[in-house]
Amino acid sequence: MNESRRAVALGFFDGLHLGHAALLERVKERAQQLNAEPVVLTFDVHPDTLVFGKEVPLINSAPEREEIIRRVFGIDTTVFLHFNRRMMQMPWEEFISSAVNELGIVAVIVGHDFSFGYHGQGTPERLKRWCEERGISCDVIPAVKIDGRVVSSTEIRTLIAEGRIEEANRLLGHPHMLSDMIHSGFHLGTKLGSPTINMAFPAGVVIPRHGVYVARVWLDDGSSYEAVTNVGVRPTVSEGERVSVESHLLDFSGNLYGRHARVEFLHFLRPERKFESVERLAEQILSDTDQTRMWFHKSQS
């Protein structure tokens, strides 16, 4: 692999879904063929935030995107460009010319619907012609469809927000996840006999439907545990609106504060609700745990 020569996948890649997977697999193929390093070139801020002046709730934060690219797709280098007004107004030829010169690009791979540069004038067709004139390989990846529908980040965001997590995971091609440092929480789980680890969603990402999920938690030493994960505001014991993510790791005991963890959401068990007493909540937690064990047993049989 020649690291001065790079095959580049260009796009935003929110969620790293099956459509993105086709693109990233192609960039690895081109890199191998051309003795180059496979690289993902992406942006820290979703372009629609500036272009259309609207906040786009993302499936993953920028660090999570980088982690998925490395862990799931085996691409070690992700380059983040800061998307600001200057970049938004940059002519597309200037953008791609600058990227080619700075990164030593010998191949570019984009999706069928990707556009860039001022007013989105850098279309896949124009990019392909520009590359061909300069002897640079260029692939435009067609839409990937599941059940006749194009796989899109927009649909996946909706599925996650509605708690339809298994449908979302099918389109992603891997479990939707949250990656975060474990921090000290409310310690209520310990008092109820089900100690939990506490995490939080980063600002700007879509929050899954409030409720209880079957999950798998991966720790930073590579170990993993079946888990019951609650996403919500804890209405039985709290009046606040802050969303917390609390996971009870089955068959684990120990202190994990300060460690890094990844929660993979696998199945929606039930909506979050307010119980008439803490004792009733404790009973429900035991039921959630039993259902989680049953779900894993069925999925492995």
Image (tube, grey):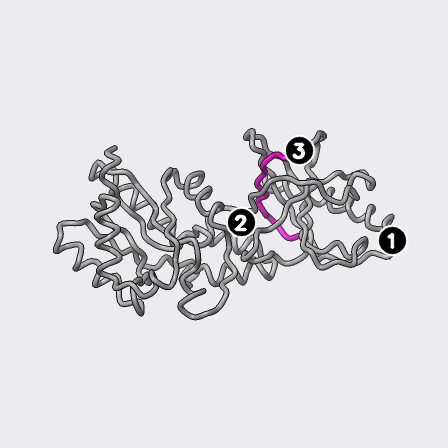
Q: Are marks 3 and 2 in contact (CB under 8 Å)?
A: no
Q: For this view, does 229 lie left or right of residue 223? A: right
The image quarter in which residue 221 lies: top right
Q: For this view, does 133 lie left or right of residue 151? A: left
Q: Secondary structure at mark 1?
A: loop
User: From where the camera sits, is residue 301 visible?
Assistant: no
Residue of label 3: 256
The picture places residue 8, in percent across and down from the top left corner, at 29, 47
What residue lies at 45% left-to-right and 59% top-to-bottom? 153
Residue of label 2: 176
What residue lies at 32% left-to-right and 52% top-to-bottom? 10
Main SS of the magenta segment? strand
The image quarter in which residue 247 lies: top right
Q: Which residues are magenta?
A: 258-269
The picture places residue 168, in percent across and down from the top left corner, at 52, 55
The image quarter in which residue 293 lies: top right
Label 1 and label 2: CA atoms lie apart by: 32 Å
